[in-house]
Image (cartoon, rainbow, N blue to C red):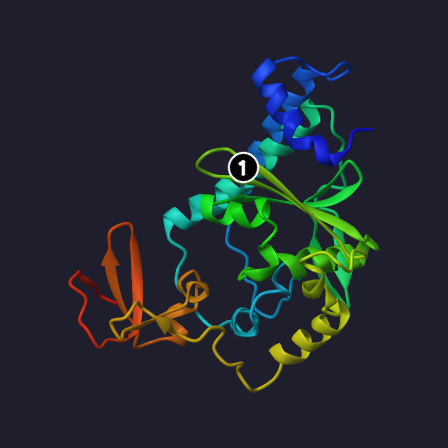
């Protein structure tokens, strides 16, 4: 049986040399890959699921207010077409990498297996060579977190607690992320071991997942909305204050910050909560 630590060099070698691993039926795997891609497209064309009143383990590590808003049906921004493509690309990436893993001789099992913690359910991506793994597509900036083992220091989407919850449900002490840079195609593998108390991420794993799930279940049914997830941060030395990056990617940005003003910069937008010095770029109408 192959070791997951060899997965990336094995995939690269396969694509560079085109030398197939003995015993692999390439035609059967290509057909399987096509079927998985077709299912991804079917799911993308299906109706949006209403998440109101539902908790998922995939969200358990996100900030409380995001979870509260989703559970209680608070309206977020409509998902734009480009964002749908981004989500679709992530699913297509997963199918491609799974196929490449199989073609390079690695074992992929338990795909989309359902797991549960305190009545809250989720679905894992898979096991690779016996290791619990979540597969991610990432920007070049985000890939650095997986390459340099800094995910635990900047995890706005709750990836650590998500996979930690899956591992708890499956009684696993080791788990990993296999990530791909959407622009360059570069791959990175980040492995965690809950028994390694000297690891740089060890403190992040001290969270009691069972207690976290219990707290979230109680929180979302309470009458008190949690405080905003992130406080505004300084926009340089101008005196202006802008939304933190965790807010700029959130569907509930306008709900939490109704008076924030959006300005269009080259290749990016900023949302200012305090304007001391008026930006010399166009302001984007709020649209509501």
> Residue at 84% across / 55% down in the picture?
171
82, 136: nearer the viewer: 136
Rendered-image quadrant of the N terminus: top right
Q: Is residue 70 left or right of residue 210?
A: left
Residue 256 at least partly seen: yes
Residue 219 vertical position relative to residue 131 in the rendered view, above or below:
below
Examine the rendering and report whether any part of residue 288 can be seen: no
x, y percent for residue 170: 81, 54
Q: Residue 206 placed where, x, y %?
A: 73, 67
Location of residue 262 by image quarter: bottom left
* Quarter holding residue 112: top right
Secondary structure of residue under mark 1: helix
Q: Residue at x 30, y 54 (%)?
A: 268
Q: Position of residue 90 (x, y in %)?
A: 52, 43
Quadrant, the C terminus:
bottom left
Tag count = 1
Q: Residue furthest front?
A: 198
Q: Residue under circle 1?
A: 92
């Amino acid at each position: 049986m192959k070791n997951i630590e060899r997965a990336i060099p094995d995939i690269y070698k396969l694509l560079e040399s085109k030398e197939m691993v003995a015993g692999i039926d390439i035609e059967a795997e290509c057909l399987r890959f096509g079927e998985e891609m077709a299912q991804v497209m079917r799911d993308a064309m299906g109706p949006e699921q209403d998440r109101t009143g539902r908790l998922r383990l995939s969200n358990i590590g996100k900030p409380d207010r995001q979870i509260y808003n989703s559970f209680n049906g608070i309206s977020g921004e409509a998902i734009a077409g480009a964002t749908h493509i981004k989500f679709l690309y992530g699913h297509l990436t997963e199918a491609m990498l799974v196929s490449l893993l199989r073609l390079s001789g690695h074992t992929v099992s338990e795909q989309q297996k359902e797991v549960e913690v305190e009545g809250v359910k989720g679905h894992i991506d898979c096991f690779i060579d016996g290791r619990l793994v979540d597969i991610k597509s990432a920007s070049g900036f985000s890939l650095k977190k997986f390459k340099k083992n800094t995910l635990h220091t900047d995890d706005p989407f709750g990836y650590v607690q998500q996979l930690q919850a899956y591992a708890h449900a499956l009684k696993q002490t080791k788990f990993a992320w296999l990530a791909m840079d959407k622009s360059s195609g570069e791959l990175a593998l980040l492995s965690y071991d809950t028994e390694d108390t000297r690891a740089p991420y060890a403190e992040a794993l001290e969270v009691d997942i069972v207690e976290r799930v219990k707290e979230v279940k109680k929180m979302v049914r309470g009458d008190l909305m949690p405080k905003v997830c992130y406080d505004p941060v300084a926009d340089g030395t101008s005196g202006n204050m802008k939304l933190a990056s965790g807010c700029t990617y959130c569907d509930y940005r306008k709900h939490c910050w109704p008076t924030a003003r959006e300005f269009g910069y080259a290749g990016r937008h900023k949302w200012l909560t305090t304007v001391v010095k008026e930006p010399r770029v166009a302001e984007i109408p709020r649209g509501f």
